[in-house]
Image (tube, coloured by chain):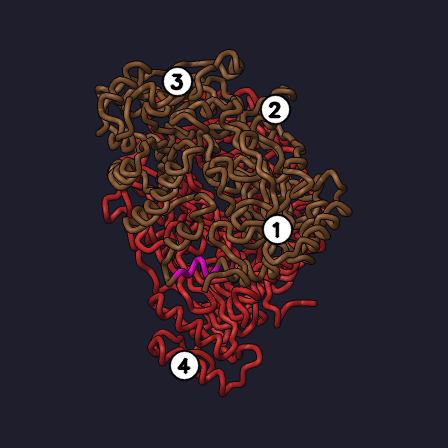
Chain colours: A red, B brown
Amino acid sequence: MAWYDHSMSAPVANDVLPPGLSAADFAALLRSFAAALGQDAVLPCGADGDGAAEFRDPYSFPGWDDHWPSAVVQPGSVEDVQAVVRIARQYKVPLWTTSMGKNNAYGGPAPRVRGSVVVSMRRLNRVLEVNEELAYAVVEPGVSFFDLCAELRARGSGLWASIPDLGWGSVVGNAVDHGVGYLPGGNHADSQCGMEVVLASGEVLRTGMGAMTGNHAWHAHRRGFGPSVDNLFMQSNFGIVTKMGKWLTPRPEVYVPVEVHAPREQDLEALIDTMRVLLLDGTVGNVPLIGTATGAAAMMRPRSGWHAGDGPLPPEFYERAARELGLGYWNLRLALYGAEPVVDAQLARVKAAFARSLPAAEITARKIAGDDVSEQTVVTHPERVQAGVPGLALLDSLQWWGGVGGHLDFSPVAPLSGAHARALVKLIRPEVERAGLDFWPGTILTPRSFYMVSPLLYDTTNEAQVRAAYGVYQRLVAVVGEAGYGLYRGHIEFMDDIAARYDFGDHAMLRLYGTLKDALDPDGILSPGKQGIWPGSMRPA
Amino acid sequence: MAWYDHSMSAPVANDVLPPGLSAADFAALLRSFAAALGQDAVLPCGADGDGAAEFRDPYSFPGWDDHWPSAVVQPGSVEDVQAVVRIARQYKVPLWTTSMGKNNAYGGPAPRVRGSVVVSMRRLNRVLEVNEELAYAVVEPGVSFFDLCAELRARGSGLWASIPDLGWGSVVGNAVDHGVGYLPGGNHADSQCGMEVVLASGEVLRTGMGAMTGNHAWHAHRRGFGPSVDNLFMQSNFGIVTKMGKWLTPRPEVYVPVEVHAPREQDLEALIDTMRVLLLDGTVGNVPLIGTATGAAAMMRPRSGWHAGDGPLPPEFYERAARELGLGYWNLRLALYGAEPVVDAQLARVKAAFARSLPAAEITARKIAGDDVSEQTVVTHPERVQAGVPGLALLDSLQWWGGVGGHLDFSPVAPLSGAHARALVKLIRPEVERAGLDFWPGTILTPRSFYMVSPLLYDTTNEAQVRAAYGVYQRLVAVVGEAGYGLYRGHIEFMDDIAARYDFGDHAMLRLYGTLKDALDPDGILSPGKQGIWPGSMRPA
């Protein structure tokens, strides 16, 4: 799979320094880290090696160095994290925290500010607790979805974890970046409960009930006494999360993955409006997704194997892809979980709803005993990812343009109605196709909103194509912003653009973030620029 | 019902001044408020009248004046709130915000700091929007549950609102105090979406997607770009909420309230352990409650009508009350909502689960078409309060000790297991009975935790009994704290005691709250002392 591992294909010597630091001070900084954490915790960089190369954006054009880190430290304990923060304050050097470093399409492990020292949390990789009775796990940031699911299997646990499409990312990192998975509890930020955080002061904070020493409900009850601050440490640069409770879901008596294949481009609205009713009334309790056949087509063979030429994909492509793959133009997946009679009744309701709203759609469902679910029994990506069986299958789609595949994800949010989905498609598709790229949204549904995650695929070795993707991304931030839609997450290169769109009250929210940043991190060492939040010393006027 | 309206029964002239303010400055302050908001927005106080009397704790002993306000202002618009904040900064006078003022058992509308100026939000009483499609309402803080439900009825809405036991409180006030109701979405803090807040600076902030001007998803999607700050404005003194989205639930095809009457005191553990499974697997989606027969007994007649003498209620009382009222020792209520076949299957599962775990328990259920639910068709308190039909029936229980009834609510939280419930009962009951009061918990269940809300009832005109209740409350904060349980909410008199128990990392959380308070409200004007959070100038060393 080396074709998508950009760091391996393009090692480049790293001679980047932190902003404002001399080479001598930088060397002293690294010696301080090594003295506190051990030499092996500091990856060799500069003349000593290219340990920092792996912490560049894997989907950037190889020569672009705006977001290259200067060095990498890998704490192995909470005390190590405290030491890193204290040393960084002493040298006034910007840190950039990553967990597994797999925030790909949004910058991967790469820092917003060139020369930041990456704090990789990979060594903090323990599953600290699995509570079978109360259905939660407590994990460190270096625990991937693969790790957590393997631990559940090894323990013979009766619990399933909600997972995103790719299993290599961090459970903590995904939650704190407002990530989404597909089981019940798939809003990962909302199914987080109880954190431990190292603040810029070096202090250790525990949130919610954990703010009381020895409290039994740290990971069972979301709030303590006073305002809940957990959300302050998500999509922010106010602290470094070192532990987190993740709510899990009991293995159901039966698991029923459902697919709805809708034949026509205009069926998107009915799909969404039908799902809204089923989500709001509790018939469906997981996180459904609607994709086009293009994603599945890309997992089979590159674009050139489907269509000759560079222009927008013609209607014939969509028809052929749907026919060959046995899919519709739009393909909805959802799943039901629970006692068999309840699930049977829910499934009947789902089928009846789509039979009414989309009589031409094909609905398939498969019933599997929860006890029987394994990598052997569930084999397709939709069936696995909704049953907590993690994988990397989606990476196969990166070969779409040939070369070395990469993508940016353009991810606006809207109220859950067909009309808004239609409006967003009309805004995004022409811009993407005008840039010579393909429009390929994965629309993720909550009961009242959707994320239209639109991956802009390109060949990272084709600079013109990478530039086209970056250009259209930036343009689209403005286009959807003008129309009243905001992004829920964004690539490091565009965080300021995205944040600037949140402008109510002359940018009151960004001003509040600045006030909080200055109060919580007066030296501005923690991930400056993340989500457009800058410390006073670096804040644009 | 004047017997519980303490302010009417004991008017006392108000000559309280804000801390540090001379009588002349106070008069100037009131003139400033009147000039900005109009004379009718400033309630007469001192020699001019007793407008502030209604804003004392209705359940305090009448002579106790530790929490009396100096004056009351009633803004009628967001601009009015901004003006109040600016004037308060000018005079450095502490404000105390209340919505409907019905935070009874925790202090009602009364301020933590004597002499604070109460900002009553009652005039901001508009239901700004009801979105039928996306199932939410947008309300101002002066909208009570009665108001919201009346508005839904008047519009012929197909939506139900989750409500707490008493309907007179504010929808916003309840949510921002981490209040609980009993429908799906009954965790009112979690089913809030999108706020408008006036900060201590006088600026207006909109949260989540509302931070973008004209964003369509303000009340449909919980997060924007960057950390979500909504929770900072709950159980805090960091801002004044002026608008809030509240998620509603679609009127179900059928509504099935269920009761489980368990005969023995020791049945509590099995009730809770059975419910945990049903909540975690999604069979039950509302917020169930377990009470003793004492609550229902108190709604029929005073304690003296059940038991002669002052000692703890003997086993004979519990037997007789259960028999007369047709209840068990413990009485669980829950409700199912949805399509009839789904609900039928869920009900069968609920019945089977309790038949296994508590064969001696009696289970009753009633099926009502959602369209048929009204004040005429659902008449008992449990059936009404789980169907969004608000009332005041529970107030009848306040006559328990005779005189003028009042109570403090002692409300610890624990993981949802029978063992923890048993442990808390063992800790709380003896202390309460030693104080000459009755133990009468209402245990409110979430999928992983419970609140054991223990009202300490007393006759507010009996100073010795009020003192006994205050004494045992304070003692219990320490007793349950030592055992690893924290309170989710607390009376103004004990906020410091409760907050001090959240001591991890040498009180790291309280220190963080202080840092946030100083950054967001440098003059310390907003509700000083709320939840134990003090501005720098008033912070205990």
Question: Which comes sooner in the sequence, label 2 or label 1?
Answer: 1
Give the distance between the C-alpha atoms of the residues marked 2 and 3, in whole angstroms.
Answer: 32 Å
Q: Residue A71: percent from the left, percent from the top?
A: 46, 75
Does the magenta segment cover residue B392?
A: no
Q: Which residues are magenta?
A: B507-512
Question: Which comes sooner in the sequence, label 3 or label 1?
Answer: 1
Whether label 4 touches label 1, CB < 8 Å: no
Give whichever of B243, B315 is nearer the camera. Answer: B315
- Above-or-below relation of A121 to A319: below
> Residue at position x 42%, y 23% from top?
B336
- Residue of label 3: B300
> Residue at position x 46%, y 38% from top?
B61
- Residue of label 2: B152
Tell whether A60 sits left or right of A200.
right
Mark 4 vs mark 1: in front = 1
- Residue of label 4: A32
Q: Residue A180: percent from the left, percent from the top?
A: 48, 46
Give whichever of B261, B279 is nearer the camera. Answer: B261
Kind of element beneath mark 2: helix
- Asked whether residue A412 appears in the rendered view, the answer is no
Question: Which comes sooner in the sequence, label 2 or label 3?
Answer: 2
Give the distance between the C-alpha atoms of the residues marked 3 and 1, in whole angstroms.
Answer: 43 Å
